[in-house]
Image (spheres, grey):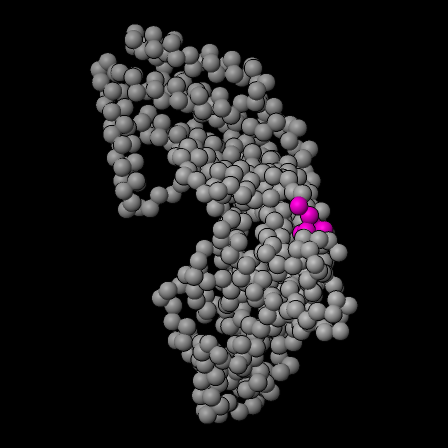
Amino acid sequence: MPRNDERPTSTSTVASEDQNSDTESSERCDSLTSSSDVDCSRQSFTSDSSSKHNSPSCSPPKTLTLDEVMASARDLSNLSLAHEIVVNQNFHLEPPDLPQNSLEKKVKDMVHKAFWDCLESELNDDPPEYNYAIKLLDEIRDTLLSFLNPGANRLRTQIMEVLDMDLIRQQADNNAVDIQGLVSYIINTMGKFCAPVRDDEIKKLKENSANLVTLFKEIFRVLDLMKMDMVNFTIQSLRPELQRQSVEYERAKFQSILERTPSALDHTNEWIKFSIEEATQIMPPLDKSSDSGQSGKPLPGPTLVLNTAYIRLLTWDESKGPLPETLMTDEVRLQEMQRSLQLYQVVASVLLIVYSSIGGAVSGLPTLVERLKKMTAVLLEGMHSADFNLTEALGNISAQICCEVNKSLAERNFPALPAELQETLKGQICDITQENNPIRTLVEGRVQQYFRVVLASTSSHRAPPPVPPGLGLIQSELIGLGVSFVNLVNFNKKVYGPFYVSILKNLLFIDMPAPALQNGIVKGPPSSPLQSK
């Protein structure tokens, strides 16, 4: 961090020097089965001992006070901000940009215009008045002081002496204040504090020969930019430390929300409960020759339940209910993943139809296939908007594909595709919109299969598994989504694993005999409901 009389090399001068040593970020996440907090062993689900911090609150329903609601809202806001800083390396703040015709912008512009008109009127008086100018100088002084490090006593003293409000008021009363000299000092001081990216802005201020009102407007505009630079530099400096403490911090914040709002896990309970039912349906039949000699229906293990729950997020329908509370901080990321996945599923379906219908015309031409893939993806952009006509878009895609293929055939001195084949191809591509379309069903099923393998693998974030047959055309995109998804899931397990353990314990082992775990599958009930085997 540079001294206060030196030029900063980053976006601000507010962070202390010891923050620059925090350059390592901790390893993000491991799988649920490798984390001690979320160990889903038989003992953790049948043990009655659990700490208050690691389990959801079991308080009876109560009426919340306004203070409790506001406190929970603050905790949720802090939790969301910290989570965004940790997981989004590109996270930064930008100056607010109000919509042009919004009421807020109209009111803001009206108030500002009234203030600047009053300032101009005072300065044009004879003799001039400086009441509004002094208010601006006072605010500028406070802003400049906020850029200083705690130990920058020399610069602090200098600013306080030059911008001494009591002295300036006395000079104004005697019509002896040098506004131009004070403004010049302010601009030079801003040049010492600003990041290099603002050099051009400072240069323009120095060259500005307009009246004082316009100059004050520009000074405040640049100061706002410098404030934003300061905030973003602080975020960048704090990120390594937040990454080291993010799991404990987010868990503690959510626990405090849960203590004030016992219903804060209701949607999570329903999410996991439904996943238990879904995972049970895909369980293999119980072996009647097992040691227990019982033929009860097998229950899925905790890891299978959670993996099934996370897979459901990829096809989550917001119209049928909100996301689980433990995933609200990742809502935007999940929506982006879901939309990207749906887009590339359609791309894969289109290309599979092309290969099955006119494979000979595109085989051995990877450049043509890549061009068809990019063209299809571009024409499908915006497919999730309400006014997007997917059938019409697929019709346009099929026409463009036929055009590109015919062009490629002509370049190799081959005849164009027959008109009947082109019509058949267009019909097959447009049929993708049908819910039970076999190509669409095949692609979606294999995508689900791939993500199940990704979640089940303990090293998928380092060495992603190969994609299933038929998805090679979107392999790079699918692998990228898989890595992003598994990182999100692993971090979520790290933070909320103890809450999931408590919920799974209640749903799997309460009100029923406790089953024995064999090879990750829950089988056969022992005599005691919570007796460890």
Residue toward you, 228 or 497? 497
Give the vertical position of 404 relative to 294 (above or below): below
Tell me where residue 54 sits by quadrant.
top right
Q: Is residue 47 magenta?
A: yes
Q: Is residue 335 magenta?
A: no
Residue 238 x %, y %? 60, 35
User: Residue at 45% of width from left, 43% of height from top?
Assistant: 61
User: Residue at 58% of width from left, 38% of height from top?
Assistant: 252
| Count of numbered circles in the view | 0
Residue toward you, 132 or 146? 146
User: Residue at 67% of width from left, 49% of height from top?
Assistant: 38
Q: Which residues are magenta?
A: 43-48
Residue toward you, 43 or 142? 43
User: Residue at 61% of width from left, 59% of height from top?
Assistant: 512
- Horizontal side of residue 189 vs 132, given as left or right: right
Residue 66 x %, y %? 39, 34
Residue toward you, 177 or 488? 488
Residue 140 x %, y %? 41, 23
> Outermost residue, front direction?
527
Confirm whether residue 340 shows in the render: no
Give the vertical position of 367 relative to 192 (above or below): below
> Outermost residue, right direction?
291
Main secondary structure along the magenta-highlighted residues: helix
- Quadrant (top left, top right, bottom left, bottom right) of the C terminus: bottom right
- Horizontal side of residue 211 vs 527, given as left or right: left
Residue 505 x %, y %? 62, 53
Confirm whether residue 490 shows in the render: yes
